[in-house]
Amino acid sequence: MTTATIRGPYRRGIERRREVVDIATEVFGEFGFKGGTLQQVADRVGGTPAAVLKLFGTKEKLLLAVLDHWDVITREIAVQGTEELARLDGLVKLMSYHVEHKGLLQLYTTMAAEASNPQHPAHEYMTARYHRTLEDMKRQFRDAAGAGHFRAMSEVEIAHEGEFLLAAMDGLQIQFILIPGFDLVASFNAYVDGVLDRLSSTSRER
């Protein structure tokens, strides 16, 4: 059964949960998990903290729902890239999405910093996501090289490319958040062009 075919109170409950998740994304992105409160979420969504808790149980579970929502969105965009380019063009699309949805990006950077504390409720989630993301990036470079789109690379080189890509994404996104007028898409595009020029098995047409 799709969401479109769900009717009545159950469907309204699903829609309300999505609305609360969207608002909580903004609140946690602006204030972090510790600084953001259920009262702030409730005020913005037009309800009460008790009503929010009725939907999610705890503030920690609300945070995990927000992170799951963010993970689904970013994965759907990133996989739109082409295998010939190691899906780097999909990541360019993701940068464009983050420019248009700054709250999600603020949430990501805030959680990445806060969740370095092992006691943080998102620590396990963020740690696992970083490991998974890094492995995905390594696989993309490995597959592109194996298919002949990139020059042959050792496993050490592949590991470094994945690490550098993830570091470039995080670093540029932080600059976008902190520096007014910073062009995230243009800067990441320039980085990707450098990677492709350096690794492509044949010269790319300009």
Image (cartoon, rainbow, N blue to C red):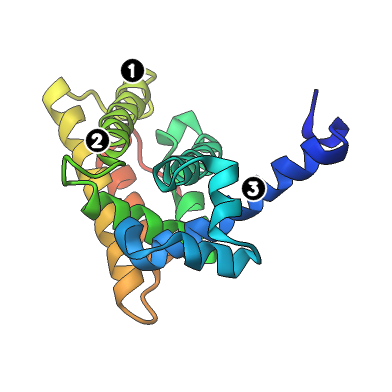
Mark 1 — residue?
146
Q: Please, what is the three-letter code of the amino acid marked with disc 1?
A: Gly
Determine the CA span between mark 3 and mark 2.
Answer: 25 Å
- Pointer 3 local density, CA inside 10 Å: few below 14, some 14–19, many at least 20: some
Mark whose residue sits in front, 3 or 1: 3
Residue 162 x, y percent position in the rendering: 24, 36
- Pointer 2 local density, CA inside 10 Å: few below 14, some 14–19, many at least 20: some
State the residue in front, 135 or 156.
Answer: 135
Residue 92 in the figure: left or right of residue 100: left
Of the numbered discs in the image, which one, if any, rests on residue 127? 2
Mark whose residue sits in front, 3 or 2: 3
SS of the residue under disc 1: helix
Q: Residue at x 52, y 62 (%)?
A: 41
Q: Please, what is the three-letter code of the amino acid marked with disc 2?
A: Thr
Residue 9 x, y percent position in the rendering: 82, 40
Q: Residue at x 51, y 34 (%)?
A: 79
Residue 22 in the figure: left or right of residue 177: right
SS of the residue under disc 2: helix
Residue 53 in the figure: left or right of residue 29: right
Q: Quadrant of residue 129?
A: top left
Q: How many marks?
A: 3
